[in-house]
Amino acid sequence: MHKELAHFLASMNQQKQHHIGYCGDNVAEILQTLEKDFSPLADVFFVSKDMEINGAIGLDIDDEEKTAEVWGPFSTSEEVALQLWKKLKETYESTLNTLYFFINKENQQGIRFAQNIGAHHQGNHFILEASKNHYEQKAIDFKPQYTDSFSELHEAAFPNTYHSAKEIISKLDDLNRLLILTDQHNIKGYVYIEALPEYGEGNIEFITVSPQYRRQGIGTQLTQSALASLFQFEEIASVTLCVSATNDSALSLYQAAGFSLKHELMLFTYQF
């Protein structure tokens, strides 16, 4: 079931008209995620079959927050999508509070689905991509003496985010790196990256510049340092990141550093 579902999700998500932002398009990566994060699979993924899978919708659940990111719905049939939604809603309306949908702007069927069930549009986001090239690395790896400075900057820039400063530091290794630019005892800015060479992918998860050092090119230096670090892996051919469509300054920064637009996604929330 895991392998069949992974192939179905990948084949659907490779098409912009069915694309969902929370799900990847690499079979091996999706399979590993299903086995690791969607357990038991039958409890969190609702699947329709007619000889072969013809529809699916799943939940990546945060039990503590009582929220979930929705993988889907994936189906060429709007009727099948609504049938799967009915099962999902009946199962989780008493245990979850909020669902998040991240739907490609070209996925008109998905957008109609979100509107029909009463989900609320919360804004658009751009998925940007940079291809392998030569990038200059000026940032250095994080050092323990900058823990306080990093923690203060991270918590101010990203309050209540999915990774605290302490969690980021605990994850650091050869694949997960925190790169910083410093001014004596303080951090001018930082970028946290995660490399997934086995899937040929790299991600920029967090990047920010301290307010007193903005408009000095620090953001571009950090972005290019991140790209230089990630492209050290031969397997990684491209790097992606997500930015709000209304964040003009960030968009300009990333485009100047070598990123181009890959997807525009629409964020919807649904309250039970």
Image (tube, rainbow, N blue to C red):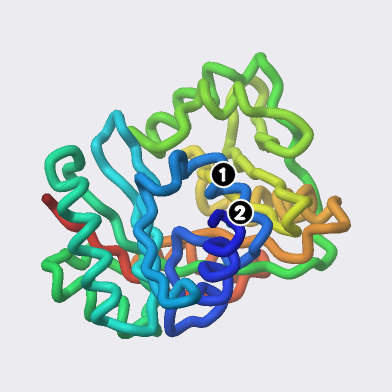
Q: Is residue 262 visible?
A: no
**In contact (CB < 8 Å): disc 1 and disc 2:** yes
Q: Secondary structure at mark 2?
A: helix
Residue 86, how many percent across, how many down? 18, 63
Query: Is 1 located above or below residue 11 in the figure?
Result: above
Q: Which mark is residue 201?
A: none
Query: Splitting the image into 4 quarters, where does residue 84 fall?
Result: bottom left
Residue 31, how many percent across, how many down? 61, 54
For disc 2, the neighbor class at 10 Å (few under 14, some 14 to 19, many from 20) is some
In the image: residue 132, left or right of residue 78? right
Residue drawn at x 51%, y 48% as measured from the top left: 214
For disc 1, the neighbor class at 10 Å (few under 14, some 14 to 19, many from 20) is few
Distance between mark 1 and mark 2 Cα atoms: 6 Å
Residue drawn at x 40%, y 60% as measured from the top left: 71
What residue is shown with label 1? 35
Residue 99, how many percent across, how many down? 25, 52
In the image: residue 139, left or right of residue 58? right
Q: Secondary structure at mark 1?
A: helix
Query: Splitting the image into 4 quarters, where does residue 82 fall?
Result: bottom left
Query: Splitting the image into 4 quarters, where does residue 140 fall?
Result: top right
| Quarter of the picture holding the N terminus | bottom right
Query: Is 216 located above or below residue 260 in the figure?
Result: above
Residue drawn at x 21%, y 67% as measured from the top left: 121
Name the amino acid, label 2: Leu
Query: Is 228 located above or below residue 40 in the figure?
Result: below
What residue is shown with label 2? 31
Q: Is residue 85 visible?
A: yes
Residue drawn at x 14%, y 69% as measured from the top left: 117
Q: Nearer the viewer, residue 46 or 30?
A: 46
Query: Is 179 located above or below residue 103 in the figure?
Result: above
Q: Nearer the viewer, residue 142 or 171?
A: 171
